[in-house]
């Protein structure tokens, strides 16, 4: 493979060389594809199975995540559902790291309640604890790192090595939404499955909903593709094309998100109203605690550049309160034990000028002071 920057910018181009020489790949909307004759196919039959535009996106996603196959689906939740509906059944068990996207927990709880696919949580720290939680019926280990929203780092390679040493059949799945393949390549660290909410950094502009599953094993890919053909949560051609376009700047955007976030993560602790800052060191996601006596609602209302909105990973800065918004479905005890308190702010640092962002957040924190 060429270097990632070249793959991202050029990897999907030139597919129309024989016909028009168009530099950028064309967008095909057709749902039906003509067959040359009985028992013959151009490789495309009906668009739920494959479309040229989605296939091009899937090849690009597989390449940049160091996999052999990718499946582009209609949302991040559709990606998570594809993994579970294809690879688990009633009576199976899985283990999930304990601090991850709130919607994933809502999904896991639904699987447990309705399908008796039970799960245990692991705190992401001691791998021996994880090994102890493995049962004969354990099928899958689900990790999100850095964790969401408290930015704990999990050693993917350590987990994969230890688990596969005793149980090579257990699949390690990593939600790589936060760091993207620019900063983390789970498949090269021993994971079996990578999942993305492409709504976030891969899409990058707060304007498309999409998801992806990437694997390196061909048998696993076939199982997932058969399930996707059956259930149909595929990504439509236009969104696929937009995502191809977005990926061309992923490396540049991630570098700029990181540089803005590093700047803010270093400065935020100097503010009187900020009690603690959580940052993984790379990427655009920062969490911080407003100090006691600082009113979260007042803080949000005073933001002028950053929007109070859930979601993340776009060029526009978004700020949310996980306790109330993204993680509201977790029990209060679970939220508090993870450090998801009402004072915790999650900041998806965008690509605005870093000093404008700093001034916006600093003035809003100051305004929130009730002491
Ligand atoms: C947003 C998100 C999801 C869900 O993705 P959707 O595209 O909203 O369905 C899953 N995992 C993480 C880490 C997310 O941030």
Image (cartoon, rainbow, N blue to C red):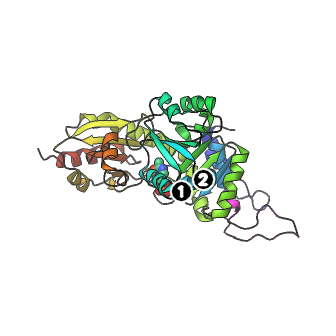
Left-right relation of 237 to 341? right
The residue nearer to you, when weighing 216 against 272, is: 216
Tag 1's secondary structure? helix
- List x then y, in percent, for residue 39: 87, 66
The residue nearer to you, when weighing 245 against 145, is: 145
- At label 1, counting other C-alpha atoms closer than 10 Å, the crowd grade (few under 14, some 14-19, many 20 or more) is some
Tag 2's secondary structure? loop
- List x then y, in percent, for residue 60: 65, 49
Left-right relation of 55 to 312? right
Magenta region, main secondary structure: loop
Which tag, 1 or 2, sits closer to the chain's start?
A: 2
The residue nearer to you, when weighing 150 against 30, is: 150
Q: Is residue 237 above or below residue 150?
A: below
- The quarter in which the N terminus is drawn is top right
User: Are the residues tagged 1 and 2 within 8 Å (C-beta)?
Assistant: yes
Q: Which residue is mark 1?
A: 115
- At label 2, counting other C-alpha atoms closer than 10 Å, the crowd grade (few under 14, some 14-19, many 20 or more) is some
The residue nearer to you, when weighing 260 against 222, is: 222
Image mark count? 2
Residue 301 belongs to the span the image colors magenta: no
- Residue 188's disc is none
- List x then y, in percent, for residue 221: 69, 49
Q: Which residue is mark 2?
A: 89
Q: Is residue 223 above or below residue 270?
A: below
The quarter of the picture where residue 170 lies is top right
Query: Does mark 2 have its CB less than 8 Å from ligand 1?
Result: no
Q: Label 1 vs label 2: CA separation?
A: 7 Å
Q: Which residues are magenta?
A: 28-55
- List x then y, in percent, for residue 349: 38, 46
């Amino acid at each position: 493979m060429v270097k990632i920057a070249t793959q991202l910018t050029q990897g999907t181009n030139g597919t129309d060389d024989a016909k028009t020489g168009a530099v950028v790949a064309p967008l095909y909307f057709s749902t039906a594809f003509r067959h040359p004759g009985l028992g013959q196919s151009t490789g495309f039959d009906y668009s739920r199975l494959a479309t040229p535009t989605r296939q091009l996106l899937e090849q690009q996603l597989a390449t940049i995540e160091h996999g052999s196959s990718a499946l582009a689906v209609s949302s991040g939740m559709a990606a998570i559902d594809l993994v579970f509906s294809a690879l688990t059944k009633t009576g199976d068990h899985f283990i999930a790291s304990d601090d991850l996207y709130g919607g994933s927990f809502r999904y896991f709880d639904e699987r447990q309640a309705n399908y008796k696919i039970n799960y245990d949580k692991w705190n992401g720290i001691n791998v021996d604890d994880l090994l102890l939680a493995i049962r004969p019926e354990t099928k899958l280990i689900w990790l999100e790192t850095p964790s969401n929203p408290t930015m704990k780092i999990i050693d993917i390679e350590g987990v994969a090595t230890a688990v596969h040493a005793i149980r090579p059949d257990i699949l390690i799945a990593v939600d790589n939404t936060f760091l993207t393949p620019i900063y983390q390549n789970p498949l090269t660290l021993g994971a079996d499955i990578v999942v993305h909410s492409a709504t976030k950094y891969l899409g990058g502009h707060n304007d498309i909903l999409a998801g992806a599953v990437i694997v390196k094993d061909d048998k696993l890919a076939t199982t997932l593709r058969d399930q996707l053909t059956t259930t149909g949560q595929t990504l439509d051609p236009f969104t696929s094309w937009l995502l191809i376009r977005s990926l061309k700047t992923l490396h540049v955007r991630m570098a700029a998100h990181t540089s803005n976030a590093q700047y803010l993560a270093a400065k935020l602790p100097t503010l009187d109203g900020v009690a603690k800052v959580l940052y993984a060191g790379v990427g655009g996601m920062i969490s911080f605690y407003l100090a006691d006596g600082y009113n979260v609602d007042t803080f949000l209302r005073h933001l002028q550049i950053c929007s109070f909105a859930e979601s993340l990973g776009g060029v526009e800065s978004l700020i949310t309160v996980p306790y109330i918004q993204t993680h509201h479905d977790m029990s209060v005890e679970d939220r508090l034990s993870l450090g998801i308190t009402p004072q915790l702010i999650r900041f998806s640092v965008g690509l605005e000028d870093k000093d404008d962002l700093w001034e916006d957040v600093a003035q809003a924190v100051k305004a929130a002071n009730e002491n």
